[in-house]
Amino acid sequence: MTRIAVLGSTHMDLVAHAARAPGSGETVTGREFRTIPGGKGANQAVAAARAGGEVTMIGAVGDDLYGALLRDGLDHAGVDTDLLHTAEGPSGTAHIVVDDTGANSIVVIPGANGVVTALGPGEIAAVAAADLLLMQLELPLSAVVEGARAARAQGVRTILTPSPARPLPDELLDHIDLLVPNEHEAAELSGQAEPHAAAQILLRQVPEVIVTLGAKGCLYAARGGEPVLFEAPAVKAVDTTGAGDTFVGTLAVALGEGRPVAESVAWASAAAALCVQKPGASTSMPYRSEIEAV
Ligand code: RIB
């Protein structure tokens, strides 16, 4: 079984469904509201656990009702939450509008995620015991850098989802094995709007890059090799929230099982395609049997 440590965020997603997202200064009437456990870290953890990984979540929830619900959700998914700390104050929340095309816009309030500024001995040991470490950018950067450094020191493979996009220090990128931005994040990090060009720039800093392209699939590029464009299964999306996290969590399990890149990407793309056909993030992530069936 692939052992995966996730160092990342946990949010309660407060999701409004409306025909379209409001513009600045505008009010629109939506049709439905849901609270759904999310956060890029927790989403990747749930996706990896459902895909068959043995997953440990490192992060924090608040001491409010959302915190208890978020922990329960992860426990229920089979994720080890011993290193998911309960901090004083509110849990992180994500305020999401999903429009009729399935696209979303998100405002994140970090809450308890903001207290995760450093790793203790227990967290370092969990990273060292893993086959892969998954990280995103919804925790303070100091913790992400420390996690990446600890993983590299122990020969643990690191995957970074650079979201939300922000300038990244060399001390982080130097310890990343695989970077998985979406096309907007790739453009922001590289200064190149075209994904092939962006990937070539990013390869100067990390050995492997996968630029996810939504319904168009993804672009895989590795140093010294030809880039490969993988198509995604054609499906009708109702909510794309968490699709990128599903892709990464599933990809990590497949890579950890020793599957070749093409097969791992096929698994991850199938999982993401299943995810977008249902509403919500953690609620829409497929189980291994469903991925295998695709
Ligand atoms: O990637 C999707 C996630 O981003 C949501 O679940 C939300 O919590 C935000 O962190």
Image (cartoon, grey):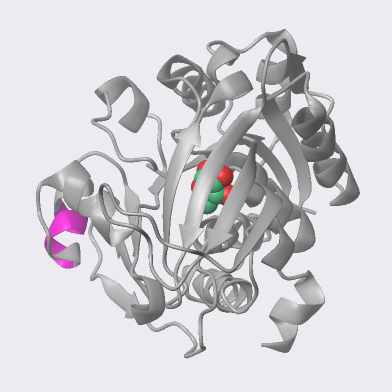
Determine whether 272 is above or below 9 in the image. Answer: below
In the image shown, does 9 or 108 lie closer to the viewer? 108
In the image shown, does 56 or 193 lie closer to the viewer? 193
In the image shown, does 220 or 22 lie closer to the viewer? 22
Task: Name the residue: 25% across, 70% down.
Answer: 227
Determine whether 280 is above or below 84 in the image. Answer: below
Q: Is residue 247 visible?
A: yes
On the rendered structure, is 79 left or right of 228?
A: right
On the rendered structure, is 224 left or right of 257?
A: left
Magenta highlight on residue 199: yes
In the rendered image, which quarter is residue 182 located in? bottom left
Quadrant where the C terminus sits is bottom right
Badge count: 0
Q: Which residues are magenta?
A: 196-200
Magenta highlight on residue 22: no
Whole-percent x, y for residue 225 in the image: 25, 65
Task: Name the residue: 80% across, 54% down.
Answer: 1
On the rendered structure, is 281 left or right of 69?
A: left
Q: Is residue 133 visible?
A: no
Whole-percent x, y for residue 144 in the image: 48, 24
On the rendered structure, is 25 left or right of 122?
A: left
In the image shown, does 244 or 130 lie closer to the viewer? 244
Determine whether 118 is above or below 268 in the image. Answer: above
Whole-percent x, y for residue 170 in the image: 26, 24
Q: Main secondary structure of the magenta part?
A: helix
Task: Name the residue: 17% across, 66% down.
Answer: 196
Task: Name the residue: 47% across, 57% down.
Answer: 97
Whole-percent x, y for residue 112 in the image: 62, 20
In the rendered image, which quarter is residue 123 located in? top right
